[in-house]
Amino acid sequence: MDLHDILLEFRENEETPMRLLLVEDDHETASYLIKGLKESGYTVDHAADGKEGLFMAIEMDYDLIILDRMLPGLDGLSVLKTLRSSGRKTPVLILSALGEVDDRVQGLKAGGDDYLVKPFAFAELLARIEALSRRGDPAGEQTRLKVADLELDRLTRTVRRAGRTIDMQPREFKLLEYLMQHAGQVVTRTMLLEGVWDYHFDPQTNVIDVHISRLRNKIDKGFDTPLLHTVRGAGYVLKAPDGDGG
């Protein structure tokens, strides 16, 4: 069974198929993608220019948006920035023939969740869509996360351990949130770069080490049991002590 068949079976087992918006001005490319996505079990709406795509993205609910970067009327990055400024958090996968590092960084900083360079294999597009869908809708996520005596409240943006409030910088909060979402699992540097810093490549930076060190000082220093552990050669894991079901 190939990737297409696996994803199709997965989609067919869901009660409601994912609804996608494809914003692509090239007729041939759009027709090819729409056909393939529908065959894979998705519901697809199509917009042929930036203005129409922005209107549909804001006015209607989609599980994911596939957005071409070079569009008539309104370019893809402008669509994306306006969409994010309107409060819409729909995952966006950018498609573009511009594949330099700076181009990808611009797309991700504008609010994109992933960036796929043309030409691409359709199987990779399906895999990227599936990966983004697994991140889930923030509105449907738990508002509180708990590991042992460590608690994080997404609504109030507060962190407490053993009843003590811990001050967090925005990036530290996001890093801890990601680790708590994957509590008990080894989280790699690549996962952190993509999930916390939105880097889809390794910029050869020590930013992760610095933030992990700061986070460890805040949530473990002064407490009896450490929760944040380094797994040498693999990554990091946030876990409750053995025997603690928190």
Image: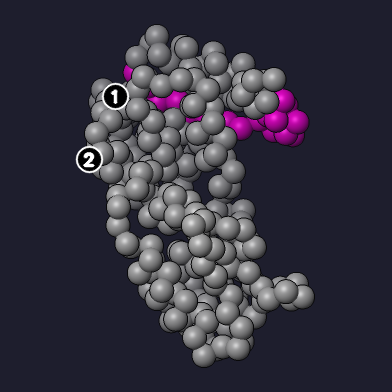
Where residue 97 is drawn, which disc sits there? Answer: 1
* Lower position in the chain sequence, tag 1 or tag 2: 1
Position in image of residue 69 (x %, y %): 30, 29
Residue found at the very far front of the displayed protein: 233
Where residue 160 is drawn, which disc sits there? Answer: none
- Near-viewer residue (125 or 30): 125
Above or below: residue 122 compared with residue 103: above
Kind of residue at disc 1: Ala
Distance of label 1 from label 2 (alpha carbons): 13 Å
Please state the extent of the stretch shown in magenta in the rendering: 9-25
Where residue 102 is drawn, which disc sits there? Answer: 2
* Category of crowding for the residue at label 2, using alpha-carbon neighbours closer than 10 angstroms: few (below 14), some (14–19), many (at least 20): few
Label 2 secondary element: helix
Above or below: residue 212 compared with residue 51: below
Kind of residue at disc 2: Asp
- Near-viewer residue (223 or 31): 223
Label 1 secondary element: loop
| 108 sits to left or right of 65 | left
- Whether residue 22 is in magenta: the answer is yes
* Category of crowding for the residue at label 1, using alpha-carbon neighbours closer than 10 angstroms: few (below 14), some (14–19), many (at least 20): some
Above or below: residue 157 compared with residue 104: below
| Residue at point 55%, 70% (across, down) | 229
| 226 sits to left or right of 202 | right
